[in-house]
Amino acid sequence: MVDVDGVLIKPRPGGWAVDMESDLGLSPATLAEHFFAMHYSADLGCGKPDLAFFARVGERTGLAPDEMVLIDDKVENVEAAWVAGWRGVLWTGKARLGDVLALA
């Protein structure tokens, strides 16, 4: 699973499964048609970099930590992902997203 600025993406045969964790303040109705599920910090009771966030997303998705990737623009969030057993990549927005995904 890949988290790109709040969007969780899981590659799978035949396509991509997309979940979303967002603190962007966007309407779920606006975004729902693009995602299988949305994970809001308010619903989870925690957010990044809290380790409980990573555990709760794992519980909701059914994925193991080593199946998760966090791509984020905050060092503390990427470091927390590593501690939680996820892969983590710092993305400042300067590199192309496809290049960043290749690193994950």
Image: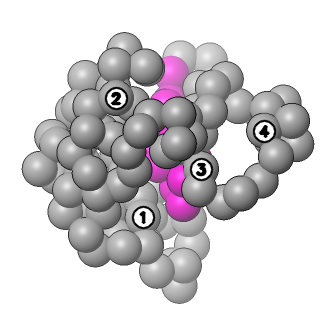
| Residue that carries the numbered disc 4 in the rendered image | 28
Q: Name the element at disc 2.
A: helix
Disc 1 from disc 2: Cα separation: 18 Å
Disc 1 from disc 3: Cα separation: 12 Å
| Residue that carries the numbered disc 3 in the rendered image | 22
Q: Earlier in the sequence, mark 3 or mark 4?
A: 3
Magenta highlight range? 1-12
Q: Main secondary structure of the magenta part?
A: strand
Residue at left 34%, top 19%?
Answer: 59
Asked if the stretch drawn in magenta spans residue 11, the answer is yes
Q: Which amino acid does label 3 sit on?
A: Ser
Asked if the stretch drawn in magenta spans residue 53, the answer is no
Most extreme residue toward the right is 30
Disc 4 from disc 2: Cα separation: 19 Å
Task: Using residue 78 as the reference point, say whether residue 92 is left or right of it.
Answer: right
Whether residue 16 is visible, yes or no, is: no
Q: In which image quadrant can residue 97 be found?
A: bottom right
Q: Earlier in the sequence, mark 4 or mark 2?
A: 4
Residue 17 or residue 20, whichever sits in front: 20
Q: Where is residue 29 in the image (x, y as percent from the top left)?
A: 86, 35
Q: What residue type is labelled 4?
A: Pro
| Residue that carries the numbered disc 2 in the rendered image | 56
Report the disc number at residue 72: 1
Q: Where is residue 15 in the image (x, y as percent from the top left)?
A: 63, 24
